[in-house]
């Protein structure tokens, strides 16, 4: 991946030019992802959304392709900003991990993280099955099922989310064909953090699925075409519930995603 090469260059520069100065020691570390602290995989996870729906999740699996720590707050929404930001990265976990978000127990990324003992101010999660800049990607990033209740109406639901051409944004001007690259749709950033990686510690990313459903109006969810009696999110932004689920999934909110540097006993 292009991003991994950029991070490797950053770490090499720190090793050759910075070691011995404050906050520059090269470290390797483990990384983990988990649901909310009290999430129990043997029981459903329930919450009330901002729109007043009582939501119960029975399945919620999130595919995280990679995680990164940045030394500054990137502005990925700006048209001129690249999705890869050489010079900002202080740590990388080239992943991936398929995390059961209904389980509060930390689950390990498949790759060891590398970084420097430099203060990080932002975290990034990459929702990709491979190359962040691939024009298409059929990897299922989110797989959810559950039910929502409001005003006596019940909506058993299920849905899957991918981030490929189904999420492409058409350029508003022919003069700016690359103003909305698909890679920006796949990056959750910037999640505020304030810590420096240290030897002997680990990166822990927690995910609160309630944030995904904050603005989902289940009354507008369409019946499933394959599962009678069930409603289904579309794998596109063609309707309000599906569009807002994707928006909640990719929003860098501390109510949904948190990064922490922890000691092994805390895992």
Image: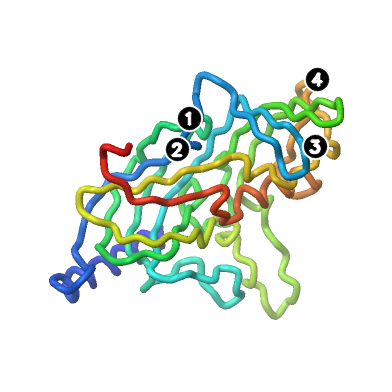
User: Is the Cβ of the residue at disc 2 closer than 8 Å to that at disc 1?
Assistant: yes
Q: Alpha carbon of mark 1 to alpha carbon of mark 4: how far?
A: 29 Å
Residue at the spot 61% in from the left edge and 55% down from the top edge: 251
Q: Is residue 187 left or right of residue 194?
A: right
Q: Which of marks 2 and 1 is nearer the N terminus?
A: 2
Q: Earlier in the sequence, mark 3 or mark 4?
A: 3
User: Is the Cβ of the residue at disc 1 closer than 8 Å to that at disc 4?
Assistant: no
Q: Name the residue under label 3.
A: 218
Q: Earlier in the sequence, mark 1 or mark 4?
A: 1
Q: Mark 1 points at which residue?
A: 103
Pick whichever, 249 or 129, lies toward us. 249
Q: Name the residue under label 2.
A: 34
Q: Residues within 10 Å of mark 3 (few under 14, many from 20)?
A: many
Q: Which quadrant of the rendered structure holds the C terminus?
A: top left
Q: In this view, does 249 lie to the left or right of 244?
A: left
In terms of image quadrants, where is residue 228? top right
Residue at the spot 71% in from the left edge and 40% down from the top edge: 49
Q: Alpha carbon of mark 4 to alpha carbon of mark 2: how far?
A: 32 Å
- Residue 226 vs 131, above or below: the answer is above
User: Is the Cβ of the residue at disc 4 closer than 8 Å to that at disc 2?
Assistant: no
Percent position of residue 237, x then y: 74, 49
Q: Which of marks 4 and 2 is nearer the N terminus?
A: 2
Q: Nearer the viewer, mark 4 or mark 2?
A: 2
Pick whichever, 66 or 133, lies toward us. 66
Q: Name the residue under label 4.
A: 228
Residue at the spot 55% in from the left edge and 60% down from the top edge: 183
């Amino acid at each position: 991946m292009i991003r991994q090469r950029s991070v490797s260059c950053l770490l090499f520069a720190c090793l050759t030019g910075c070691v011995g100065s404050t906050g520059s020691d090269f470290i390797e570390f483990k990384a983990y992802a988990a649901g909310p602290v009290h999430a129990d995989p043997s029981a459903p996870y329930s919450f009330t959304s901002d729109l007043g729906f009582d939501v119960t999740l029975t399945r919620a699996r999130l595919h995280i392709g990679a995680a990164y720590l940045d030394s500054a707050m990137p502005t990925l929404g700006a048209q001129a900003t690249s999705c890869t930001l050489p010079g900002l990265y202080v740590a990388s976990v080239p992943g991936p991990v398929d995390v059961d978000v209904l389980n509060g127990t930390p689950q390990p990324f498949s790759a060891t993280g590398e970084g420097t003992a430099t203060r990080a101010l932002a975290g990034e999660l990459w929702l990709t099955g491979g190359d962040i800049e691939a024009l298409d990607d059929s990897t299922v990033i989110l797989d959810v099922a559950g039910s929502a209740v409001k005003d006596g109406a019940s909506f058993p639901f299920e849905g899957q989310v991918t981030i490929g051409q189904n999420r492409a944004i058409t350029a508003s001007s022919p003069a700016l064909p690359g103003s909305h690259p698909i890679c920006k749709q796949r990056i959750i950033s910037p999640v505020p953090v304030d810590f420096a990686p240290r030897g002997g510690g680990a990166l822990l990313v927690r995910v609160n699925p309630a944030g995904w459903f904050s603005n989902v109006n289940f009354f507008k969810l369409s019946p499933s075409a394959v599962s009678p009696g069930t409603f289904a999110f579309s794998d596109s932004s063609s309707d309000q519930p599906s569009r807002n689920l994707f928006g909640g999934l990719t929003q860098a909110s501390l109510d949904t995603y948190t990064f922490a540097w922890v000691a092994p006993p805390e895992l």
